[in-house]
Image: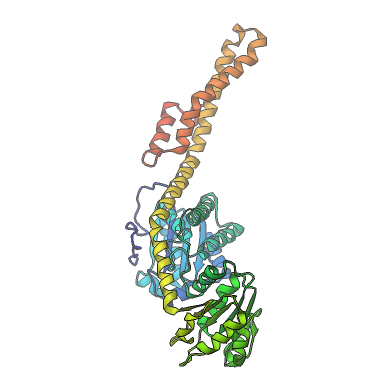
């Protein structure tokens, strides 16, 4: 078997054939992401929703896999399993997920493998945004939810993976609510939105004009559209890119390039993103636009290199001019804010992982707790029946109520502790209780 790569800042992982004592449910995670494999390999193993469904069904066809979840996005393909047999499940999942699509991933060890509690931790850190190429990205939380919903609809997740998905989603929501891991724009498009909100507070009642229908203009249009800008217009000298832009943004209105100043008078936000060698907006022309607008502010974001807007236009009153360097500065400050939150998010992940493991230990303890309660009830009933003749009949109900209450109170704390368990000695405690109270099947009578 090819060696598996260790993720940065993760504990060493075991190979599929190694066996260690589990501190939680038996889980297996294997996958590739931007840390372990280059883009050309990640592209080959990325799956459409139908392909992910087919993989889960094929995994579940094996008797050696009890539960399965597939998470495939633009930068990761990961499989979460509850195996009946670790080695067989590993080899099958490795072949079906990566071996047939990109053998290099297997041959060169460009994948990671995690087990048990670290496998569970992985999904929590993914949902919290700590494993994304863009730290704290918001989209991954919805992608985890969608993957969980699909797996549940297929019947490929059981109680363990369903609870793990619920815990991961709760972790992701806590991370974004309690920290600033997702605060601040860290892409050019959303940096434009953030600048717009600084100037106008709200974008819903604002008009935006984009000059240039290339990739950069499209990023800005995507961000502005998602944030509900009231009206989106664009101008482009060439027809081919303009048609492509309209296909992506059918709500946008194309205007003649030569009429850009006229339309700028009624727009609030201008994004210029072209490869023009000379400025497309001169100070003198913009001065006339500002006069037409009277006191209404105008935000201009110049994403061109070289710059598409005369830099002296930034001196005009009520005209706010930003170039690509100022946006990069904003993005870097926002990234610093997010990086500062990593430790707090990791603490949330640790807290939620402990809760998941506590839940699992409680799941293990539940049959024993029920057995202990049945044993105590049989003893209580037998002893009450032995002494009932010494009490008047009208007191028999009170006698049962009193003894039931005593048993419940005596067992409440031990039952609670058994359900909570202890990470290191939980199974030993369960075995000890079985021996102390003789909870073998043939000793309950």
* 207 is higher (above) or lower (below) than 7: below
Relative to residue 68, is residue 251 drawn left or right?
right
Residue 272, horizontal then vertical, whole percent: 52, 83
Q: Quadrant of the N terminus?
A: bottom left
Residue 201 spot, x, y in % from top left: 57, 66
57 horizontally vs 86: left or right: right
- Position of residue 136 measured from the top left corner of the image (x, y, whole percent): 46, 63
Instruction: Give the color scheme: rainbow, by chain, secondary structure or one colour.
Output: rainbow
* Side of 8 relative to 81 (left or right): left
Residue 335 in view, yes or no: yes
Kindly identify the residue that appears in the image at 43 percent across and 59 percent down: 29
Q: Residue 260, position in %: x, y?
A: 60, 88
Residue drawn at point x = 52 percent, y = 31 percent? 371
Image label count: 0
Image-quadrant location for residue 35: bottom left
As drawn, the residue found furthest toward the right would be 394
For this rendering, which residue is in front, 163 or 222? Answer: 222
Q: Can residue 102 be seen in this view?
A: no
Q: Residue at x 57, y 10 (%)?
A: 387
**Relative to 36, is 124 above or below?**
above
Image quadrant assignment for residue 199: bottom right
**388 to 213, vertically: above or below:** above
Q: Is residue 128 above or below residue 200?
A: above
């Amino acid at each position: 078997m090819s060696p598996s790569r260790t993720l940065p800042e993760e504990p060493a992982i075991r190979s599929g054939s190694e066996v260690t004592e589990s501190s939680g449910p038996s889980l297996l995670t294997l996958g590739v992401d931007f840390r372990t494999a280059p883009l050309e390999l990640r592209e080959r193993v990325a799956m459409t929703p139908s392909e992910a469904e087919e993989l889960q069904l094929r995994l579940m066809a094996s008797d050696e896999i009890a539960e399965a979840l597939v998470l495939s996005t633009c930068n990761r393909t990961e499989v979460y399993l509850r195996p009946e047999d670790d080695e067989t499940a590993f080899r099958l999942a490795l072949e079906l997920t990566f071996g047939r699509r990109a053998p290099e991933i297997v041959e060169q060890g460009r994948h990671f493998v995690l087990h048990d509690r670290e496998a569970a931790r992985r999904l929590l850190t993914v949902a919290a945004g700590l494993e994304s190429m863009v730290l704290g990205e918001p989209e991954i939380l919805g992608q985890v939810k969608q993957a969980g919903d699909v797996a549940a609809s297929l019947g490929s997740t059981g109680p363990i993976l369903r609870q793990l998905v619920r815990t991961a989603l709760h972790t992701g929501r806590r991370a974004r609510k309690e920290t600033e891991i997702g605060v601040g724009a860290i892409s050019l498009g959303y940096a434009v939105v953030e600048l717009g909100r600084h100037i106008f507070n709200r974008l819903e009642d604002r008009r935006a004009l984009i000059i240039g229908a290339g990739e950069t203009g499209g990023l800005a249009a995507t961000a502005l559209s998602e944030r509900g800008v009231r009206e989106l217009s664009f101008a482009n000298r060439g027809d081919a890119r303009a048609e492509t832009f309209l296909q992506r943004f059918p709500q946008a209105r194309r205007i003649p390039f030569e009429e850009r100043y006229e339309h700028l008078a009624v727009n609030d936000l201008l994004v210029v993103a072209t490869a023009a060698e000379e400025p497309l907006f001169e100070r003198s022309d913009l001065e006339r636009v500002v006069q037409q607008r009277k006191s209404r502010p105008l935000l201009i974001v110049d994403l061109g290199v070289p710059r598409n807007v005369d830099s002296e236009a930034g001196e005009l009153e009520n005209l706010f001019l930003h170039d690509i360097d100022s946006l990069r500065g904003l993005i870097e400050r926002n990234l610093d804010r997010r990086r500062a939150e990593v430790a707090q998010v990791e603490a949330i992940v640790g807290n939620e992982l402990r809760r998941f493991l506590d839940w699992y230990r409680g799941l293990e303890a539940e049959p024993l707790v029920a057995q202990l309660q049945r044993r105590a009830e049989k003893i209580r009933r037998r002893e009450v029946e032995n002494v009932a003749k010494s009490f008047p009949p009208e007191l028999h109900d009170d006698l049962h109520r009193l003894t039931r209450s005593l048993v419940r109170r005596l067992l409440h704390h031990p039952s609670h502790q058994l359900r909570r368990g202890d990470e290191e000695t939980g199974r030993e405690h369960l075995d000890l209780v079985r021996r102390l109270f003789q909870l073998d099947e043939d000793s309950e009578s």
